[in-house]
Amino acid sequence: MIERARARKLAAAGGRLALLLALLSGCASKPVEPAWRGNAAAALDSFTAEYLAGNSALAASDFARARSDMASTGQAALVAHAELLRCAVRTASLELGECAGFAPLAQDATPAERAYAAYLAGRLQGLDVALLPPQHQPIARGTAGLASVADPLSRLVAAGVLLQAGRIAPADIDTAIDTASGQGWRRPLLTWLGVAKQRAQAAGDDAGVARIDRRIALAQSR
């Protein structure tokens, strides 16, 4: 009896060992994703969320970490991707102008990346629209309105582009405000409310200015 019990235990232990070895062998045969890739993606996601929420210090730290991880590869295209993302998020929040972080990388970037940088700066004249991301092509061509852009962040980016290009309509400003509000993105909400306030002031709409001021004060409260 004792010997049979001992044999069963040994057989069970042997089975577990064989299973463990098989698992280890399977894991060893699969390529391991480089750590920088996951780290950079997570840091860029965090940067975007913190920046749109208005948390500047945290956003800056996240972006620096993502850029460092990408720069460790020595691939300019990867770092250019990070810089263009940062410029896009800034454009959505109406921090407008040329993409300074991308400029030193432009000569090693792809034509599509250079076209997107020009788009973010509102330089639509002579732009090869076919090189842009699909959701931005109708906006650049002027063949679709802002509401046609499904992704909320891309919609706000497009709104910033239209503002720079002098092609934004009053309804687009309302769309940008509603988009930022719906996502709870404090930074772009405040900047777009500021645009609406300027329009109300120019129109002599005192009641509208007061209403926007109340909304700005509420959005600024923590």
Image (cartoon, helix red, strand yellow):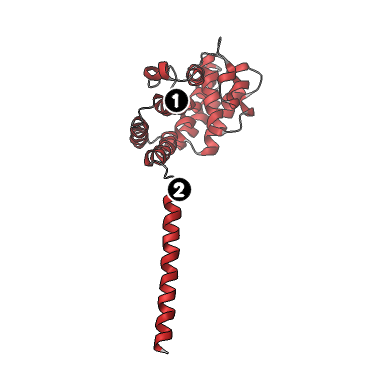
Q: Is residue 201 visible?
A: no
Q: Nearer the viewer, mark 2 or mark 1?
A: 2
Q: Position of residue 188 (x, y in %)?
A: 47, 30
- 39 to 80, vertically: above or below: below
- 163 to 187, vertically: above or below: above
Would you call the spot at circle 2 few (<14 residues within 10 Å), some (14-19), or many (20 or more)?
few
User: Foreground: 48 or 171?
Assistant: 48
Of the 4 image quadrants, the one containing the N terminus is: bottom left
Q: Amino acid at mark 1?
A: Leu
First reached walking from the N terminus: tag 2 or tag 1: 2
Q: Position of residue 116 (x, y in %)?
A: 50, 20
Q: Which quadrant would residue 138 be assigned to in this image?
A: top right
Would you call the spot at circle 1 few (<14 residues within 10 Å), some (14-19), or many (20 or more)?
many
The residue beneath circle 1 is: 84
Question: Residue 45 bears which disc, if any?
Answer: none
Q: Amino acid at mark 2?
A: Lys
Helix, strand or loop for disc 1: helix
Give the residue drawn at x 45%, y 64%.
19
Give the residue drawn at x 38%, y 22%.
101
The residue beneath circle 2 is: 30
- 12 to 139, vertically: above or below: below
Residue 186 placement, left or right of 101: right
